[in-house]
Amino acid sequence: MTPEDALRLLPKAELHCHFVSTMRASTLVELAARHRVPLRTDDLDALFAYEGLPDFLDVFNAAHAALTTGDEIARVAYEGVEDAVRAGNLRYREYFVNPDNFRDAGIGYTSLVDAMTDGLVQAERDFGVGFRIVAAINRSLPAATAVDLVGTVLAHPRDAVVGIGMDDLTPELTEDPLRFQEAYALAARHGLRGTAHVGETLSADPRNVADAVFGLGVERVDHGYRVVDDADVLARVGEAGVPFVCTPFSTRMLSGWGFDPGHRIARMVRAGLRVTLATDDAVFFRTDIGREYSEALPAMGLGLDDAVRIARVGFEAAWCDESQRERMLADLRGAALALSA
């Protein structure tokens, strides 16, 4: 067994995964044709070769437009789990979903999450992969829309929906987490968990990470790479012990950061932050959870022991019940011993 095989076989939790991005590329092309959603090309290599943000957004928006029925949503949910189990021994996953992005297709919040749940429950039966859903705020919309989204989640409780997240950028192309304090405060008062995309690219202010942790009260940070560029912020969030869910392939695609020991994710690990890995937008970035570990970590100078710690953080930071967490951690311990023998 090669070191790369060992990294692929390690049991994994994925905590940063946008639901639509779990769609198979072939399913995207099929559904787009069925619903007459235009694609730039049906050549998969060319479709996901972006020359700029507009190319990416074309495909991203087409993927949402191609999902028009509950059966299609359930199918995508199921297929995404099946693929991730094969590619990287996925054992648990949390999904971001932006209900506002489905409004134009006429799919309401409850229809969306119920269809997702149908597919994910069947996948859990067939593959043993647990799941939860995180309703995501679209930062490009007004702060009042975020409050409305939280209100919708609270008005229609679902066991699978455990928290809120936040992605995209404001109309001013900033992260500005404190703009959404009201939504996060409302969610926290009613027991919803919280995370947010902050500190993602070089244009982001490292202080956004501190604002999310100490201003919004998030329990996890998505991305957060800029934290290593501010010693004060790094010390504060490190002391708080907040987990960071990092996505190597997206940093290469969006920021052009090569996989090497100087990569910010490697620096975060060496600084003692609690880091785990995820795919972010798997189909759009042509990655999978196995590649995030088996290709990115060795190139960053991180080995199996580091990967085991990174995988452990994923299970520790998951918003699942404690009995499920203990089972998954026990499986990880057993696998780590077997793979290191």
Image: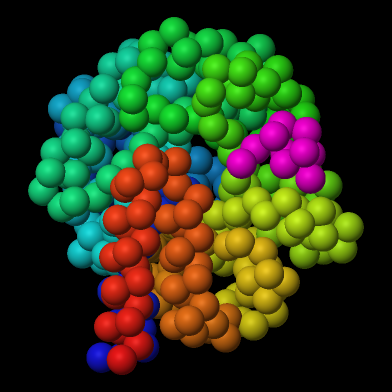
Residue 65 in the figure: left or right of residue 204: left
**Residue at x-position 72% and y-position 71%:** 271
**Residue at x-position 82% and y-position 60%:** 235
Residue 33 seen in render? no
Residue 135 in the figure: left or right of residue 37: right
Residue 151 in the figure: left or right of residue 38: right
Specify the quadrant of the image occupied by residue 161: top left
Specify the quadrant of the image occupied by residue 272: bottom right
Residue 191 % position (x, y): 53, 23
Q: Nearer the viewer, residue 337 or 123?
A: 337
Residue 153 seen in render? yes
Q: Main secondary structure of the magenta part?
A: helix
Residue 21 % position (x, y): 37, 46
Where's the N terminus, which quadrant? bottom left
Specify the quadrant of the image occupied by residue 198: top right
Residue 302 % position (x, y): 54, 82
Where's the C terminus, which quadrant? bottom left
What colouring method underlies this structural image?
Answer: rainbow
Numbered range of the magenta stretch: 210-219
Q: Residue furthest top?
A: 155
Reply yes or no: does residue 211 show up in magenta. yes
Q: Residue furthest left?
A: 126
**Residue at x-position 34% and y-position 68%:** 332
Reply yes or no: does residue 287 show up in magenta. no
**Residue at x-position 58% and y-position 34%:** 194
Count of marks, rendered view: 0
Q: Nearer the viewer, residue 34 or 221?
A: 221
